[in-house]
Amino acid sequence: MSPPRRKCHFNAELQAEYPFLKQKSNVSPHIVFCQVCRSDVDIFNSGRSNIKQHLTKKKHILAANANLKSRKLETFLKSNSSSSEDMLIAAKEGTFAYHTIKHLQSFRSLDCTSKLIVNVFEPKFAAARTKTEAIVKNVLAQEAQSQLEIDLRKANFVSITIDSSNHREIKVVPLMVRYFDGEKGIQVKLLQLRDLPGETSEQLKDYVVSALNHHNLLQKCIGMSADNTNTNFGGMRRKGVNNLFSKLNASRGKPVIGIGCVAHIFNNCLQNATDVLPIDVEVIAVKIFKHFYIFTVRVEKLKQFCDFVDVEYKKNVVVFKN
């Protein structure tokens, strides 16, 4: 007569080896519960062999594969406190938002770009179009405005630049401010950007004076730069009264320096300066072009030199055709 078979029990060794198995205290000590496939496993006869046999069953395999492809509900919920990993993800998303506006990229492309970043680099990255736009408007823009306010309070004098641009039926009027910072030098920042129903001198004056008063800059403003149009300056001699320049002087109570169009001033300076040079600048430009034209070796040396001095190489513009 063979001796009776030894009963197998779920011990600490099996628990450490198979952590997904839990012993059911209210049932027999040889019945364990599998948390993967939600079923009972009887290890009475063979112990570990019964467990290995259970792992090969179709029900357990399907449940294990499903668990690998799914995540717990806690992963979709945000806690009240932010961990170091959460702060790192937030910093990455903020950097991505700054990169987007720095290079003038459209928010429309971010839905696709964010998915690419999730698949390639960071699974928890979630800065698509809506979130990135919110970061730009509510975080980066607010910080930039706060820093600008601090700088403008320190500045003794400022000058402004105004222009307009038509975007379909909307007339956008940016107002730039120029000031000197003791640590960073001359700074040019966007003071305000609004769309106006028109472009009359009265509308522009109200817009400029309102923006300057809002930032306490009306008495600090000593110069105005704008396009040389009658609406802005009232002609070349600037003796009219129905223009932005004249009305800004009246609102301020003190004369403002009319700078005019900086681009035109710079162009006129170069044109007159080259006219009095003892050499012909155009001839020099043509000779430089001919020196590098269709000569691969010379162009490669020029590219190496540009890399050495950290200057972006640009292809020479064609100035003539044979």
Image (cartoon, rainbow, N blue to C red):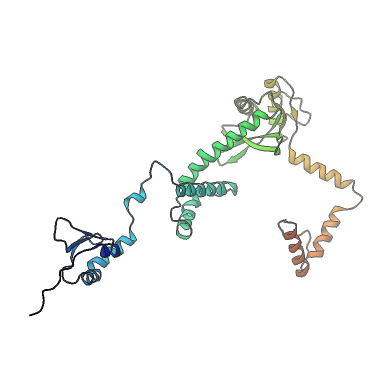
Relative to 176, say whether 64 is above or below: below
Front residue of 167 and 130:
130
- In the rendered image, residue 274, in percent from the top left (x then y), is placed at 86, 47
Residue occupying the far bottom of the picture: 1
Q: Split into 4 quadrants, where in the image is the C terminus?
A: bottom right
- In the rendered image, residue 53, in percent from the top left (x then y), is placed at 22, 72
Residue occupying the far right of the picture: 278
Q: Split into 4 quadrants, where in the image is the N terminus?
A: bottom left
Relative to 191, say whether 255 is above or below: above
Query: Can see residue 128?
Result: no
- In the rendered image, residue 134, in percent from the top left (x then y), is placed at 48, 42
Residue occupying the far left of the picture: 1
Relative to 211, say whether 47 is above or below: below
Front residue of 294 and 43:
43
Query: Could you tell whether 141 is left or right of 274 in the image?
Result: left
Query: Could you tell whether 122 is left or right of 187 in the image?
Result: left
Which quadrant of the figure has residue 244? top right
Residue occupying the far top of the picture: 253
Which quadrant of the figure has residue 246? top right
- In the rendered image, residue 71, in percent from the top left (x then y), is placed at 34, 55
Which quadrant of the figure has residue 287? bottom right
Count the labels in the image: 0
Relative to 229, say whether 116 is above or below: below
Query: Could you tell whether 194 is left or right of 245 in the image?
Result: left
Query: Can see residue 68?
Result: yes
Front residue of 27 and 175:
27
